[in-house]
Amino acid sequence: MGVAVSFQRVRPFVLASVLGLGSFLGVFVQGAPVAAASGPPPACRYDDVTTRHTSTASWSKTLVDSIYKLPNHYVPSHLVSTSKAGLNGGGQVRNFVISYLAGMAKAAKNAGAGLRVISAYRSYSTQVALYQGEIRRYGETIAKHSVARPGHSEHQLGVTIDFGSAKNGGDVSQKFAKTAAGHWMKANAWKYGWVMSYPPNRTGKTCYYSEPWHFRFVGYAIASAMHDSGVTLREYLWTHYQ
C-alpha cells in the first residue's frame, strides 16, 4: 500500500542556499547524546532509535524524525482514499482524518486556493523503494537529506499528506509555497488540525529541509497550541510526549 511518487525537489545544496541555511551538514551532530525530555530535543543526527509511542492509537503523540523511527511493521488501520474528502484520489489516510481534510479542502477551495493530494500514506516498503531510488539518482549523502529514511517518514503514520495546488500539475516542490494554495495552507491549516512539519528557516529544529507542501494532522488542540507558541512539531512532541 502507499503511493510511490517521483520527487522532483530542489536538491539539498541548492535549497540550503535558497533558504540561507549554509551547510546543512553542520546541523547534524553525529553521536550526540539524547537529551532529557525536560530540555530541548536532541541535536539533529542520523540514528535509528525506536520512537516512544509506537501504537497506532498514539498517532498524534508519535515523534518521527532523523533520530526516532517507527517499527518496520507499523501499519495504520482503516485507510481510505483521499477522494472521500472531495479531493483527488492521491493516496490514503486513516478514516478519522477524512472529515477534517474535507472541511479544510472545502475552505481552501472557497478561498480560491484549491488543493490536490500528491502523496499520503506510504508503507515502510514503499519508503524503502523511494529512498533507494534517491540513492541511485543522487548518492546516499544527498538522499538522506532529501528523502526520509525508511521508518523515519511521517507518511507511515497515515495522517500526513503532501499537498499541491489544484491549479497546477506536477510534483511537490518549493514552488508550492508561492501558490495561492501554499499561502492559504501556511496561514490556515492549523485551524483544521493540520500543521506544517518542516517550516522554512527551522531546519536546526526539525532536522529536515523546509517542505511547505508537507502537512501532518495532529488535531486542533495540538495544532492550536503550536500556532500560539510558535514551536515546531518536533519541539512540541518532544516536550509533551517523548
Image (cartoon, grey):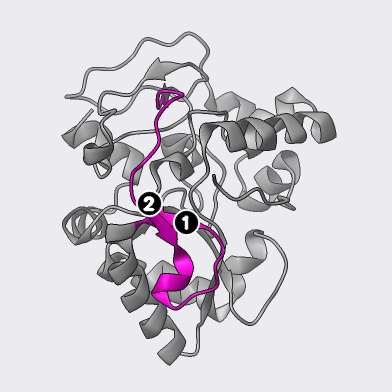
The reply to whether the magenta stretch includes residue 179 is: no
* Left or right of residue 79, residue 219 in this image: left
Q: Quadrant of residue 27?
A: top right
Q: Position of residue 156 (x, y in %)?
A: 45, 40
Compared with residue 30, is residue 218 higher up or lower down, i.e. above or below?
Answer: below
Q: Position of residue 241 (x, y in %)?
A: 19, 32
* Left or right of residue 235, residue 90 in this image: right
Q: Which quadrant is the C terminus positioned in?
A: top left
The secondary structure type at the circle numbered 2 is loop
Q: Which mark is residue 159?
A: 2
Disc 1: which residue: 92
Residues rendered magenta in the picture: 69-94
Q: Nearer the viewer, mark 1 or mark 2?
A: 1
Q: Looking at numbered disc 2 in the image, what kind of residue is underneath it?
A: Val
Residue at 50% across, 83% down = 113
Compared with residue 207, is residue 102 higher up or lower down, i.e. above or below?
Answer: below
Is residue 23 in sight in this rendering? no
